[in-house]
Amino acid sequence: MVAVELRPWQRWDAANYAYMLNHVDFSYLEDTYLEYRDARAAKRHIEQALSDEEQRGDLYRAVIVNGVLAGEVQVVSQYGVHHIDAFLGCLLMEEYTGRGVGYQACRQIIEMAFEKNDYQRLTAQVYDPNKASIGMLEKLGFAHEVTLRNGVRKDENVYDVHVYGLLREDFS
């Protein structure tokens, strides 16, 4: 098993963050992060992430494998009456997929999220063709809650979106 370490992003990580995003397969991911693929934009994102962590309790962590940046995991709080829930996200550079890195990184950040915040649940969304992420979420203890039929259009394809949830009391 590969040893995975999570560490907070630093302001000086912008070039590494941009490099990482240029080596992630976005086929089944939100396009939101595509705008941060240059160092200047990546720096803005890291600044916002640090601010959100301080103000809202969000978690953005670099995924490190053998001292090398492999990706990012994040837990992003919801607002208002939904503040007891947060979204789990994971981005890995292509060479680190399929090796258990995502599972280990997500498990660690889930533990951190439940320890640091008063979340009652975490939510994750995954596009239908992304069977590897579906399997990982189920292995982490997430339960399939609903399918949004034809929920997203991505690169001229329309996919169902599966919504998974993990309750605090179900995480072991």
Image (cartoon, rainbow, N blue to C red):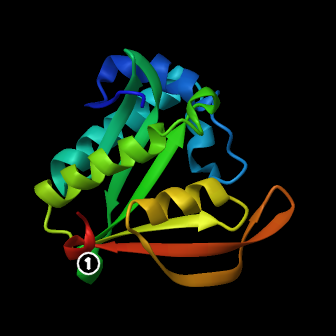
* Residue located at (84% from left, 64% from top): 157
Above or below 5: residue 52 = below
Quarter in which the N terminus is drawn: top left
107 vs 35, left or right, is left
Q: Residue at x 26, y 39 (%)?
A: 50
Image coordinates of residue 116 in percent, x first then y, are 12, 54
Task: Identify which residue is drawn at 68% across, 39% down.
Answer: 25
Front one among 9 and 127: 127
Viewer-proximal residue among 97 and 126? 97
Front residue of this view, candidates 36 and 66: 66
* Vertical comparison of 111 with 13: above or below: below
Estimate the x, y position of residue 16 in percent, counting from the top left: 47, 19
Q: Which residue shows up at 39% across the image and 16% down it?
A: 66
Tag 1 residue? 80
Quadrant for residue 64, please give it: top left
Disc 1 is placed on an element classified as helix
Left or right: 128 with respect to 55? right
Point out the image quarter for the C terminus: bottom left
Q: Would you place residue 102 above or below residue 113 in this image?
A: above
Q: Position of residue 68 (x, y in %)?
A: 43, 16
Picture layout, residue 39 above or below residue 138: above
Give the farthest residue toward the front: 1
Q: Quadrant of residue 167?
A: bottom left
Residue 21 in picture, x, y percent from top left: 58, 31
